[in-house]
Every structure is written in C-alpha cells, then in structure tokens.
Image: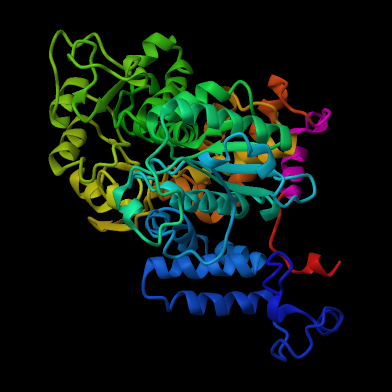
Amino acid sequence: MAANAAANMDTAFDPELREKMGLRGLLPPAQQSMATQIQRCLYQLRRKKTQLGKHVYLSSLRQTNTRLFYAVIMSEAEECLPLIYTPVVGEACQNFSKIYRRPEGLTLTIEDKGQVAKVLNNVPLPAGGPRIAVLTDGSRILGIGDQGWDGLGISIGKLCLYVAAAGIHPRATLPIVVDLGTNSQEKLEDPMYLGLRQKRASDDEYREFLDEVMDALNKKFPNLIIQFEDFTSDHAFEFLARYQDKYPMFNDDIQGTGCVVLGTFVAAARLSSKASGKPLSEHRILLTGAGSGAGVGKQLLSFFTQQGFTEEEARKKIWMVDSKGLITKDRGDKLAPQKQEWARDDNNGQQFQSLEDIIDYAKPTALIGLSTVPNTFTPSVLRKMADLNKRPIIMPLSNPSSKSECNHQQAIEGTDGRAIFAAGSPFGDVEYDGKTFKASQANNFLVFPGIGLAGALTKVSRITPSMITTAAVSLANCLTEEEEKEGRVLPDIARIREVSRDVATAVIQQINKEGYARDGGYTAGFMEENLKEWVEGEMWSPSYEKLHT
C-alpha cells in the first residue's frame, strides 16, 4: 500500500477493492471515510511535542498516503501550513539529513556534469510530464544560510504549497536540488549529512553546470515551469537575468516576494491614505535588507508608476538600507550591481547609519523589513513611524519568525494600535486597548501557486514582469468586506484556493495578452467569469472517490 502513495486509501478501501487488490485480511475490518481518517491524523499530529516532530509526522504521511496528507493540511490550513513550510521548514532543513526516511525529488550534483540529460531519464514520468519544479542550490535557505543538499527540504515544502493552495497535481511536481557542495563546516563534519562532502564549486563551474541543467530540463520537459528558490543574492539576480528570457522560469525570492509585497503594500497604502486623507502618490517606502530588497524594490516601482510617476521619479520614492546604513552613491564602499541602482545621490554628502536617523531623513509612510536581522524595528523605530503617520505601514517580512524585524505585539504596542501590519511569518492576534488586532501574513504562497497554475494551464513559454505585477494587483483585490473590517490587508489563508484561482485567472489573461500561451488559443477563448470557473475545475483535490474509477 505504501509503495504507491498516490493510490493508497488505507482504511477507506471498500470490500470490493480489498478483494480485487489482494488486501483482504491486511487491513482493519472497519471501512472509514476520509473525514474520519483526517480526525485520526489530527489526533496523532496534535500529540507530537515539538514543531519538528509534527513536520516529520506530516512528511511521513505525505510519503505513504498523498491524498490524505493534502486533505489534512487543507482541512486545517492555518494549523498545518506553518508546519510544512515557514517557519518550521527552516528547522527541518537544518536537520534534513537527520530526519531523512526515504528518497524524494531529484538530486543533481556537480559530479553529474556532462551527464545531466542521462540522469533525467531516471525521473518517473506522469502523464504529460512534470509541470512545476522548485530548484534550489541550498546556499541561502530562509535566514539560516548554507544548508547544502539539505536545502532539498525547501523545494519539497514549496511544492506542497503548490498542491494544497493551487491544485497542481502532486505527480506533476518535481523538487530539485543542485548540489555543488557546501561551505558549512557543520554540515561537512556531520557524519549523517547526505550531500556532497566538499566545498562549493567555483562560480565558473557553477555557471557552466547550471546552464547544462536548465538546457536538459527544458529539452526533456518543455512545458516545465522552474521556480528558483533560496539562492544567494548574487547568484539569484545573475541567474534570473541569465534565464528569464530563455525558459519558463522565475525566482521566488526576487519576483515572488516582490509580488506579494506589492500586493500587500497596495492594500495597506489604501488604508493608510484613507486615514490620512493624503493621496497614494505621497507614500514613501523605507526598505531594510538590500538582498531580496533590491528585487522587491523593482516590483514596488510599479505602484508609483501607476500613480503617474516615471520610473526614475518612482525610484526616488524608495529608500534602501543595508547592513552599513542608507545606500548612497558617495558612501565610499563598492556596491554590488543590485545595490547600485538604489544608491541615492540626493543626500547632500550626509551618510545615515542608524534606522532612527534614516527615518528622520526619509520620513517614510511604510517600513519594510527583509534584513533577516531580528528586532531591527525597535520601540524607538516604531515610535518614530507612529509620530510621522496616522496609520504607519509596518511590514517585517523576514523568515522564519526568529528572524523577523519585530513581532505583531511589538508593532501594535509601539504604534499605539495604529500600525497596518503584515509579516512574513504567522503571528497570533493581539489584544490592545480593548481591541483585537489580526495579523496578515505576507507570504509568497499567496501568489506563486496562482502564477504557477496559470503557467501550467497555458503551457506558458515565459514568465514576464507584467505577469508578476498582474498577480500582485489581483491579490490586493482579493480581500472580502469582512476581512477589510478586521483590519487585514491580505486574505485569510483559509481562502487560499479561492485566492489562487483568482490570481491564476488574472495571470492567464495577461499571458494571453502578451502572446506567451502555448495552448493553441484555448484559454484565450474564455470570458473572465467562465475562465475563473474553468480554472477552479482544473484544480486537483484530494478525494478518494476518483480512485475507484
């Protein structure tokens, strides 16, 4: 039964199937529904004492009964999604070799150089081939650094979200790790570590190998969308520029994060402007963390260009901060290419290092954190934001929660309950001054599953910046009236499949508008409401009933 996790129904097998499949006598007598099985799984899950223990339990369930696993996490999304992805997936990657039970996904190592196409022949082929892959080199997993081969855990977790949130068929997903070694001494000295036991390959070797990987994947699976995940910033920007006009691919840390931040900011800016009476064009953004931040900044430019600014004018509305302070052209240090375009020349020779001084200088309406440095948004920083704005926008987006620039409680208390708050990790409700404040989670899983679903359904040949912007605007428009009354700036994750459907619908329309669909014009023929209904009908659901036919 465990040999085919996709077909396993466990105690749901009826007498006829038990007889037909030679299972009579091998299962308990009771035949139980999926609903009852979910109850049992939740009973067992909730008795695990640690978050990592819960992650391992769910991983084991996924490996033995695929449909039941997804039924469980979809029935209790708010409880289970943090266990299979952020924040728990960070700890899972740190211990991935230790909690290993059976092989999953595709591992391509530098030792496969010249043989990648041959290795791909070993990938089990579902009908139509895999449609979504998440590829990592393990070099910068969340905020915990180089995890080498153990970074495969991030690819597996991300693809679980594609299935749960957007109905991508589990068999159409392909987690990939490219193992070029690791510079983590801890990994290299760990006898249980399962990756290559060597230092990382040189940039030239890396570049040549990844060229081979991308070429082989595209030739073998021409409709495969490849999402790059958790590369170091320099490689992330380099490979996005190198491949985005050649293959159907995107980088989630740059474009996915930028997309969800843009969608969140659009909704937050509307609330903030409503409170202040000031137009949207007067917003000013202070962004800390120039790694992912540089890519996020590019996406945020579209907010201001939609207000009528030129791109050059829009760039002046965003202040970028790295570990040395405000990025300026005359700071005196050599700037990485992705930082150079954000270096300011209007600082009149002044250099600002502390966040408090930068806030005094820039007077932002929004403070966005992607630094992975915890407690960066101190009480004094939050107070300054509250003094400047009736409804300051506070967005600590670093993952996992231990790396967050501040938590929900700190943001609410530090701004007298006036903060418009969204974080990268899940935070609980806060009681303050007789009111209940609900946190919005600005996590990429609100957008990338819908983008991937749109690409898979249209057999997209490229994923363009306009498609990413379309997804962001669609997300900002997904809020219900009830969610707006609760003060949310993002939809409740319990509605994630509805959100993914709406995002996918909007992106499909944009794909057809740009002419990148390869479905023979099929999706171009739908009216919007009919397209939305069709998209929903194409989303896989974990029902046992279909296995009877």
Among the 4 quarters of the image, the one containing residue 276: top left
Q: Position of residue 547 (x, y in %)?
A: 80, 67
Dominant secondary-structure state across the stretch colored magenta: helix
Q: Is residue 528 magenta?
A: yes
Q: Nearer the viewer, residue 363 or 101?
A: 101
Q: Is residue 384 in view from this perspective?
A: yes
Quadrant of the image occupied by residue 130: top right
530 up-or-down from 497: above or below: above
* Quarter of the rendering occupied by the N terminus: bottom right
In the image, is residue 448 part of the stretch drawn in magenta? no
Q: Judge from the rendering whether residue 133 lies leftward or rightward of residue 509; answer left or right.
A: left
Image position, residue 220 (x, y; %): 72, 37
Q: Is residue 248 visible?
A: no
In the rendered view, tell whether residue 193 sits above or below residue 36.
above
> Magenta span covers which residues?
519-538
Q: Is residue 450 left or right of residue 336?
A: right
- Which residue is at the front of the view, 30 or 137? 137
Quarter of the image with the C terminus in it: bottom right
Could you tell me residue 271's position as x and y percent? 38, 35
Quarter occupied by residue 281: top left
| Horizontal side of residue 527 vs 154, given as left or right | right
Residue at 80% across, 64% down: 546
Query: Could you tell me residue 203's position as x and y percent?
Result: 42, 27
